Image: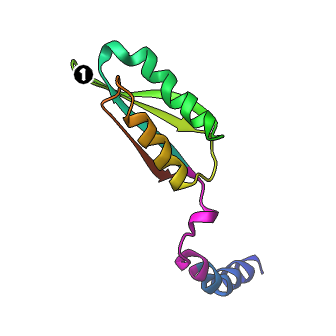
Amino acid sequence: MVTFFVLGGNTLLRPPVDYINRRPIKAEETEALYRVHVLCPPEAVTEARDLPHEELERHHYSVREIEVLSEGEDVVELAAVLAPTTANPADLDAVTEHLAKQHNLASATWTVSTTS
């Protein structure tokens, strides 16, 4: 009897499972991880850590942490990781544009990736 229920359940549930697995992922339903990246010289790391944090908070985004992604002799890459949220690309463009104008930052960009 148990075998009949297991085989019947597997057979009857396969089409709905296949349908669910084939549905495209919608951006508004997916949790995303947003990062604002800045490049700076090693001697400006302390100030470069504060700039993204201040600028993001000015746009009402909470920063979960500031990561050091790479350290070289000439340049250090930092990333401000936003707390899980839906971010507006226009806001992040404005943040990175403002950061890129700072004298001690070489560049500023932002990225988004899905969390698993």
Residue 89: image x %, image y %? 51, 55
The stretch drawn in magenta includes residue 12 = no
Q: In this view of the protein, can residue 116 be seen by the observer?
A: no
Residue 22 within the magenta-colored segment of the rendering: yes
Q: Residues within 10 Å of mark 1 (few under 14, many from 20)?
A: few
Residue 66: x, y in percent?
A: 50, 27
Report whether 27 appears left or right of 110.
right
Q: Is residue 116 left or right of residue 102?
A: right
Q: Is residue 98 above or below residue 26?
A: above
Q: Is 52 situated above or below 97?
A: above
| Residue type of the residue flagged with mark 1 | Gly
Q: Nearer the viewer, residue 34 or 48?
A: 48
Q: Residue at x 64, y 48 (%)?
A: 85
**Residue under the point 70% across and 81% down:** 9
**Where is the N terminus found, in terms of image quarters?**
bottom right
Q: Residue at x 57, y 54 (%)?
A: 88
Q: Regarding mark 1 in the picture, which secondary structure is present there?
A: loop
Determine whether, in the image, residue 71 is placed left or right of residue 18. left
* Towards the viewer: 2 or 50: 50
The residues colored magenta run 18-32
In the image, 116 versus 51, the foreground residue is 51
Residue at image mark 1: 72
